[in-house]
Image (cartoon, helix red, strand yellow):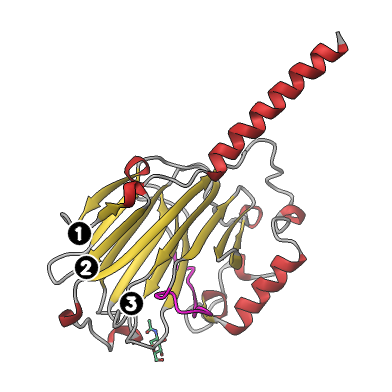
């Protein structure tokens, strides 16, 4: 009796582990996971679905979106950004739901002149409202190699990571009245477009169209679903548990040496006080 039962549980356990490994580890196939949504023939999928590129020329940019919607989970993608003179170009890579009260979790890469640093711009929209920008320089040249840009989205927090290093944490602050994205499923989007009215040095440096087409590359898309059941939504002591001591140290390192803008410190912009989620 007992051994049959154990045998059966072991069988189930192995099955569950196997299935979760499949879900977590099989790199996506771009043909299967994404739709090329704009830019005519500018977006391209190659290598049997393992590599995708977007391009931008004088006529149009381009973009793609995930076929599926996600509600919580971890999204990883490797990007290799527009090389050389990318000034004026923006590569956006973000999760978003739809409608006027949509939620959004954004990475945007603002190009620059050859040798000058990209800016990684991040934002979080809840219930249609953003205005929560943080910007960073990167500690590597994002155009030389692929690097991994990830979003961990849980009911307790959103974490932005670069090569598995946490750069930003947006905590669930519903307990003090700040809406948190937790009920609208989001799709993953990416696009490459011209934003030379604001992107580089605030719009001073314009796109050099003689260098077009501009191209960015994507690979190793991965989604790791996270169980949303039985999470303690309101217990704030659990909010940062995702990061261990090492993770928290890396986060402080990035914020100290690479963060160039934080809305939470922008008293000019919020003369009557920074938003509530900024207060410790
Ligand atoms: C581009 O380079 C300039 C000069 O180093 C720098 O001030 C700026 O932050 C860089 N990035 C962007 C996107 O403008």
Compare residues 190 and 127 and report the one nearer the observer: 190
Q: CA distance from mark 3 to mark 2?
A: 13 Å
Could you tell which of marks 3 and 2 lies nearer the N-terminus?
2
Answer whether residue 99 is visible to the viewer in this image. no
| Residue located at (35% from left, 55% from top) | 51
**Considering only order in the chain, which callout, 3 or 1, is on the residue closer to the N terminus?**
1
Where 137 falls versus 122 (above or below)?
A: below
Q: Residues within 10 Å of mark 1 (few under 14, many from 20)?
A: some
Rate crowding at label 2 as few (under 14), some (14 to 19) or many (20 or more) other CA atoms within 10 Å: many
Quadrant of picture, ligand 1 = bottom left
Q: Which element type, helix, strand or loop, lies under badge 1?
A: loop
Residue 187 is tagged as none
Check mark 3 vs ligand 1: CB closer than 8 Å? yes or no. Answer: no
**Secondary structure mostly taken by the magenta-highlighted segment of the chain:** loop
From the image, tell me which residue sits under label 1.
42
**Label 3 belongs to which residue?**
83
Instruction: Give the magenta part as a residue range.
Output: 130-144
């Amino acid at each position: 009796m007992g051994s049959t039962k154990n045998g059966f549980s072991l069988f189930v356990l192995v099955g569950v582990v196997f299935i979760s490994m499949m879900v977590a580890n099989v790199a996506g196939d771009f043909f299967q996971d994404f739709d090329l949504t704009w830019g005519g023939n500018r977006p391209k999928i190659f290598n049997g679905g393992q590599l995708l590129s977007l391009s931008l020329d004088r006529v149009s940019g381009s973009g793609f979106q995930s076929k599926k919607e996600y509600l919580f989970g971890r999204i990883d993608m490797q990007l290799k950004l527009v090389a050389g003179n990318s000034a004026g170009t923006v590569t956006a890579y973000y999760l978003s739901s739809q409608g006027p009260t949509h939620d959004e979790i954004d990475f945007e890469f603002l190009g620059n002149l050859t040798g000058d640093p990209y800016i990684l711009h991040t934002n979080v929209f809840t219930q249609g409202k953003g205005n929560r920008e943080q910007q960073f320089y990167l500690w590597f040249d994002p155009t030389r190699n692929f690097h991994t840009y990830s979003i961990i989205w849980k009911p307790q927090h959103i974490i932005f990571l670069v090569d598995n290093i946490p750069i930003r944490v947006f905590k669930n602050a519903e307990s003090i009245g700040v809406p948190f994205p937790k009920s609208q499923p989001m799709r993953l989007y990416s696009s490459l477009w011209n934003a030379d009215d604001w992107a580089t040095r605030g719009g001073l440096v314009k796109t050099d169209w003689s260098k077009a087409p501009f191209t960015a590359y994507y690979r190793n898309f991965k989604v790791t679903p996270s169980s949303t059941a039985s999470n303690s939504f309101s217990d704030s002591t659990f909010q940062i548990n995702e990061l261990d001591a090492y993770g928290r140290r890396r986060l402080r390192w990035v914020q100290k040496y690479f963060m160039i803008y934080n809305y939470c410190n922008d008293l000019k912009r919020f003369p009557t006080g920074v938003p509530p989620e900024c207060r410790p």
